[in-house]
Structure formats: C-alpha cells, structure tokens
Image (tube, helix red, strand yellow):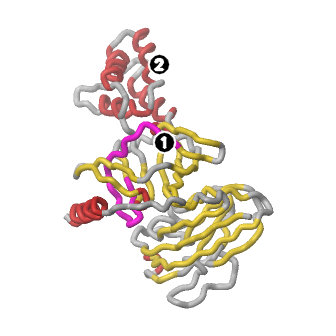
Amino acid sequence: MKKIIRLFLLLALVQGWAVAMAQNERPVFTLKMRNGDIITGIADVSSITFKTSYGDLAFPIKEVASVTLGINTFGVDKTQVMDYLNTIQNGSLSDASVDFDKLIKMEVGAIPYVKEYMESPAYKKKEGSDISVELAYDVMLSRHNISKAFRTKDVLQTNGATSIEGSYEFESLTLEADYGRISVNRAKISSIGVIFKEVDNAGIGNFKLFANQNIAGNPNGGWANTGILVRKDQLIKIIASGQVNIASLSNNAYTPDGGVNGTPGPKSMEPSYGSLVFKIGENGPMMKAGDNYSGKSNATGIIYISIFESVYNAANTGSYAVKVSVN
C-alpha cells in the first residue's frame, strides 16, 4: 500500500511540475550496450514518457537518474517467431534446420516469445535431434549477451530513489558524441544513465551527484560519466559543495572534502568516506578530488566522478554540486 501511495504522490508531482531547462544545460546520456560497449553523448530529450500499470507518466529528464531496459518485443512479428518454433519442433529435419537458422538471426525482441513458447503447458522437449528450440534459445541468449534471468519490463530510477517498472518505448536514441551524431537502436542498449552538463564549453561541466545513486560502491551507475575528455598533462580543476548523509555510515553527514558532521576532512589525498573522487577512463585509478582540486592529468580519457563509499545504500540522501574544467 505504501508503494502505491508513493507512486501516486510521485505522479502528482510529475504532472504538476512545469520544467524549464536552462538553455545551456542538456542531458548527457551514457548508454551501456548489450555487447559491453559504452557510448556517451548529449541528448536532445526534455522528458521521458514511461508507460506503467497506473497510466503514462511524463518524467522531466532532470528527475531521471537511469533507465534499465528490459527485453522489449516492440516491432517483432510474433506470428513469424511462432511459425519458426513450430517448424523446429514438429517439422522435418531439413525444414527445421532452415527455420532454426532464420530464428537465431532475429533481433533480441524475439527472445521473450521463444521463452513463452517453451513455458507453454503443451510444450514438450524434443528428444533425439540436434536441432531444437532449447538450442535456438541458448544461441540467441549468447548472441545478444542476455542472461536467462532477463526482464521484459523497463525500470526507471528517479533522483529521489524511486524505482518504477514499466515501458520506455522508442526505436532509437540520437546522441551528439565527440565523433559526431550517432543513432543507437534500442535493442542494442542495456541501460541509460543520465546526468547534466553545461554545453557552452566542451571542457567545462557543472554536475549534480546524488548520494542515493552516485556512490563508488554502486555497480549500477555509481560513477557519473562527465563526457569531458582530458588529455595527458592537461590541467584538471574540480570544485564541489553540498552535503550528503550516508546510511551505511550511521547516516553521518559528509561534505566533498570528506568532512563528517561539521568537522573538516582529512588533509591526505587518499580517498576518505564521503569525499568526492574522480578517475580518468572507466578503468582508471580512483583519486580524491575533495572540495577543491587542481592537478595535471597523468592519462588521456573521459573524466568520471563519484562519492566515495564501498557500500551502496539507496537510503542515502543529499547531493554534491560539482564543477569540472579542463584547460
């Protein structure tokens, strides 16, 4: 009941909010692809329409932290999939082999229909044949890098730590990346992370890190991709302010320098709990930024920022305002 009440409160908030995005701010989308690639670029998106069992919700993009995409059957001909499956199950070996090859080449959206077919009460595993529905299913999962525990629904995470299950329907996303405009098909995307940056200068960005999402110990979106490229020996400047309360650390209040409950943070450059940290490249070493950092880059790559804590807890509250610049 509490979840329903919370959802309706959120619906009222979203429907009553008239969002006006600053002209020099646009959302930066970080797309995690099903093949393991990561694509980052600026998106011309002001809101996300999310279909739920309670109706369609229009979320201002500034309220969205991430969207994890399920396996959507949008655009897939179910009748065609079922015809292939019936031939594989009941047809001659030559016909089954032909339709097997056709089925495994279909887009990822065909996978839920194959699972539905296998879970039908009337379905029985085919014995004595190298060509089977089970083998086709395994090949399709492997080809698209999908776990057998896949979801068919999408999950939208707001900056207020609310998770909502539904459907974000789109065919493709167009991003302005460093190498030009690129259009990415939905079927190839695993998840979408959202942050904001100023776009007046490619080497400067203002960002907001949320304690209920951007924690270094959070494996799902803990590090915010700034989209800012730094080259070796360029000067990086990072300035931060704000306060977060970290539930895993007795709900103590922290500031970007690692200060706790009003006391200044440690002078050491080693990352301390609650401190602002950064890294160059997704796999680069973590370094402490604190509330005022200036130093030359020792590598070339995209700058990532986060709040240091090894344990992630969605009950964290508060945020840091962070300005990153490269000269």
Q: Which residue is mark 1?
A: 173
The answer to which image quadrant residue 313 occupies is: bottom left
Q: Position of residue 204 (x, y in %)?
A: 64, 63
Image height check: is 2 above or below 92?
A: below
Residue 169 among magenta residues: yes
- Rendered residue at 47%/68% (across/down): 210
**First to last magenta residue range:** 156-174
Residue 13 among magenta residues: no
Label 2, label 1: how far apart the Cα atoms are = 29 Å
Mark identifier at residue 101: 2
Q: Residues within 10 Å of mark 2 (few under 14, many from 20)?
A: few
* Quadrant, the N terminus: bottom left
- Rendered residue at 53%/85% (across/down): 260
Q: Is residue 99 left or right of residue 14?
A: right
**Amino acid type at mark 2:** Asp
- Rendered residue at 63%/77% (across/down): 290
Residue 219 visible at all: no
Q: Nearer the viewer, residue 90 or 293?
A: 293
Q: Position of residue 56 (x, y in %)?
A: 27, 49
Of tags 2 and 1, the one toward the viewer is 1
Q: Is residue 100 left or right of residue 51?
A: right
Image height check: is 255 above or below 313?
A: below
Q: Nearer the viewer, residue 30 or 48?
A: 48
